[in-house]
Image (cartoon, grey):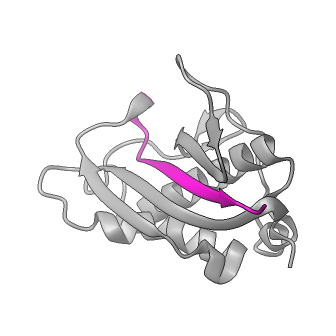
Amino acid sequence: MNPETRIAELGLVLPQPPAAAGSYVPSVRTGNLLYCAGTLPMADGKLTHTGQVGKEQTVQTGAKAAEACALNTLANVKAALGSLDRVARIVFVSGFVNAVDGFAESPAVINGASDLFVKVFGDAGRHARAAVAVNGLPRGATAEIHAVVEIKP
């Protein structure tokens, strides 16, 4: 099934690719790999989730923030490749969770992104991953996702 059709079936909308917020580009291709810069939980140019998990956000709302990050990552992938049909697999995801000191549930938060990749790409969405709690993210965002994507030949 076409990944973009699958996104629509999930009741989601692929957003416009977020603009780079600094001295970087949204993605870099080398060989058959696309390295995607970090994305925040954005919709219509605004953050959807701010604050720390364990304070202003819960694990569940943090997972929705991670899902929004993943959707923005897919928007950047589509912008770079022209179509999500060109994705062979999601290779690696780095997930960062803005959380209170001692927060130990970052894997549950980053599952929001991982689960979306699997829903969209099936087994090709399964990936290696890091899920790290930090004491702050750009603009006070609740989560940030980075991804490495393999491109079909």
* Residue 133 picture location, percent across and down: 26, 53
Is 148 covered by the magenta stretch? yes
Q: Give the residue at x 65% y 47%.
A: 31
* Residue 95 picture location, percent across and down: 40, 55
Q: Which residues are magenta?
A: 139-153
* Residue 150 picture location, percent across and down: 64, 60
From this view, report whether residue 89 is shown above or below residue 136: below
Q: Give the residue at x 73% y 38%.
A: 17
Q: Give the residue at x 41% y 47%.
A: 142
Q: Is 124 on the left-hand or right-hand side of 100?
A: right
Name the foreground residue: 122 vs 103: 122
- Return the residue found at the far left: 102
Tell me how many marks there are.
0
* Quarter of the N terminus within the rendering: bottom right
- Return the residue found at the far bottom: 123
Is 105 covered by the magenta stretch? no
Q: Is 152 on the left-hand or right-hand side of 115?
A: right
Q: Is 34 on the left-hand or right-hand side of 39?
A: right
